Amino acid sequence: MQYKVIIAIFICSIMSTVSAEAKERPYINIGKAEVKQSPMALVPLIYLGTPALASKHLAYGKRFYDIILKDLTISSYFSFIAPEAFVEDYRNRSLTPKANDPRKGFDFGSWKQIGAEFMIRSGFKINQNQFQYEAYLYHVPQRKLILGKAYSGSINDLRTIAHKFSNDIMKSLTGRNGFFMTKFVVSRGTNKSEKEIFVMDWDGANQQQVSKHRTISQSPAWSPNGRYITYTSFLYHKKMKTRNADLFLYDFEKNKRWLISYQKGINSGGTFTPDSKEILLRISKVGASDLYKTDFSGKRLTQLTNGPRGAMNVEPAVSPDGKTVAFSSDRSGKPMIYTMDMSGKKVKRLTFAGVYNSSPAWSPDGKRLAFAGFDKGHFDIFTVDANGKNIKRLTTARKRDGRLANNEYPSFSPDGRFILFSSDRTGRYQLYIVSIDGKYEHRLTFDNKDYYKPQWSPYLN
Amino acid sequence: MSKPKDSFRYFIYLSVGFHAVVFLFLTVKVLFFPDQAPEHRQSVRIDVVALPEKVTEPPKPPAATPKPAPKLEKAKPKEVKKKPVAKKAKPKKPKAKLKAPAENKKKRVKDDQSSAIARLKALQKLKSKNTNKTKEIEYKGNAISKGNSLQGLEKLHHNSYLDEVETQVRTHWNLPEWLANGNLKARVLLLVRKNGVISEKSFVVKSGNDLFDQYVIDTLEKSSPLPPPPSNLVDFYSTTGFEIGFPE
């Protein structure tokens, strides 16, 4: 027993001496790091198939490369080293390093020499309409393989395979899902007097029409589980002999749609609760426009706002935790952003600046809201903290004639790093995304259509 | 005669009764069926009309420990290092005046630069001489024992040196966005030779993310050699060393 006590005292004395010495050692806190883009060498795809078919298949490889390059460029995490700057002749090297393939493996040294931090090497072949892709992501300074995967799918699913690979890169580096498999829902002009609801990939490709009412269909919204969308259509009612703005629900799984709310007036601005079981909407009757909550049958209707004094209450947006509703209202004279709890109480005015603030949208973490603010004759996208502080303008763009363009209808990406919006800077309302610091902005649609009120889907994969 | 009196009384009762009913009705309505709460509007309302402009380059957050003095000291020798030619240009100063005006102009700029660098150099020498002198004087006048205790003048020397190191390392400390926002932390122990070369670097605390730790090592490699430690602290920094937190 005595022996054990002596050993314990001895260990304690040593530890105290060591800790005393450690305490005496000076210490520097270097602070937060500067954020930088990592130099990436995205090596063009190598053709791994039968040489005789190379000329026929190379275009697929180029198309695939362009999709990945666009995905990763827009992620804003990387700066890309131009292939002309590559020292090594990548065409005559295999996809693995010399350590694995001494005869044809590539040399990390030549990639470090051009400053590459990350490198993607990949190859493909096409067998009986099956696109087979093999890819490796390396960290050059560490000479380390981060990701190695093989993909296979129909040649028609080439875009999906490319987006899947981009997502895998994001996941392996950041630990978070990429948004490259997500979609947008949007109201798109089909002719001068009609708008229909369309769904498209996040990069504007693969547009599919969801509504065919041959009228004005607008204000679409995704359910948080990605299964439903809700939208409003100005349908002709035979009995009333007039058009009425009715709220629809569309189920992607069952490919079915049904009417949720068709009270006389405007039934619009539908948005889902986080559990995807209820819908908040605005119902406008003569002299009043208020917010309501309903289930999918449309029968259990609860009124959330009541004026005051015939004030307009529109565009509800439920916070991700399901506790707060943001909406726009002109109860103070000018349309501004307000918040309230889910029962319609504890109303709080969130924005005071500007002439006209509308279209509130929550960030996925519920800490910020984006909105469209009308100021100096045009709309811009802004963000504001959930407590109403720290307003930031994210957009500013001019039309060809020099006048300031409108940037409207914001919607957050599921990872919260970007905001989707619609802008008329080209003369048409096209889709754009902007990073939440306003630093990076990208145009996503390049056609002569008009896109209104786009909404970003949740993660769908 | 009694008829008019009775009818008068009758109408009085009727009037009182009617008023009572109206009063009762209003009271019940107010108490049990309240109308919408009246909206109280402020007599004076002030709105901020203008929304903020877009900030293209977000302002850089101020450094955690802004210490201008060591930064200046660090900047000077760098300038001198970048233009070693300037040293040679110094004695040619008077000859330049005899050359053609275009050349003269160039020469003058060069001379100005060289003289400026020379001035900086001289100032630095003077400063280092002064600091050496003061060090000697201070050591003579003080009875501070040499050792590991960071107190008094020795502490000042440590702080001044560590400020220089911090400034140098900070310039190389950058991360990809996903790591910078990842709330990762690491702490490294450094031993530094007389000439500022890092002789040993070892993790006291690792972040748990290999890539982050690699960026920490890269940052230190890019920062080496560090400023040489003050002569009286060479032993300390080569044996005991110091720790750097990336970040705290």
Image (cartoon, coloured by chain):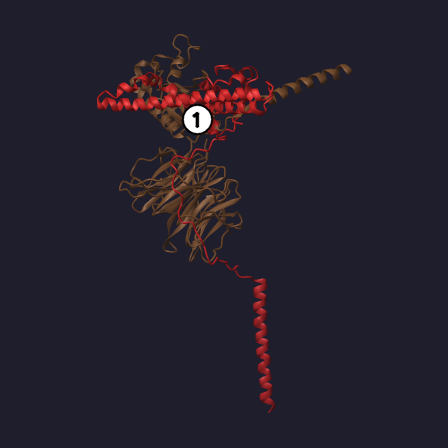
Chain colours: A brown, B red
> What residue is rendered at 54% in x and 21% in y?
B137
Q: Residue furthest right?
A: A1
Q: In the shown orientation, is residue A26 left or right of residue A450?
A: right
Residue B175 in view (yes/no): no
Residue A24 in view (yes/no): yes
- As drawn, B146 above or below A440: above
Q: Residue furthest left?
A: B100
Please state which of residues B94 and A266 is positioned toward the viewer in this rendering: B94
Residue A289, given in percent of the width and then of the height, sits at 44, 54
Q: In the shown orientation, is residue B33 left or right of residue A400?
A: right
Please state which of residues A95 and B146 is positioned toward the viewer in this rendering: B146
Residue A423, given in percent of the width and then of the height, sits at 34, 41
Quarter of the figure with the N terminus of chain A: top right
Categorize mark 1 by other alpha carbons within 10 Å: few (<14), some (14-19), many (20+).
few
Please state the chain letter of the residue tagged with numbered disc 1 in the rendered image.
B
Q: Residue furthest top?
A: A103
Q: In the shown orientation, is residue A193 left or right of residue A356?
A: left
In the picture of the structure, the residue carrying the numbered disc 1 is B72
> What residue is rendered at 35% in x and 38% in y?
A431
Instruction: Give the amino acid type for the residue marked by disc 1 in the picture.
Output: Leu
- As drawn, A309 above or below A78: below
Classify mark 1: helix, strand or loop.
Answer: helix
Residue B184, given in percent of the width and then of the height, sits at 52, 26
- As drawn, A2 above or below A437: above
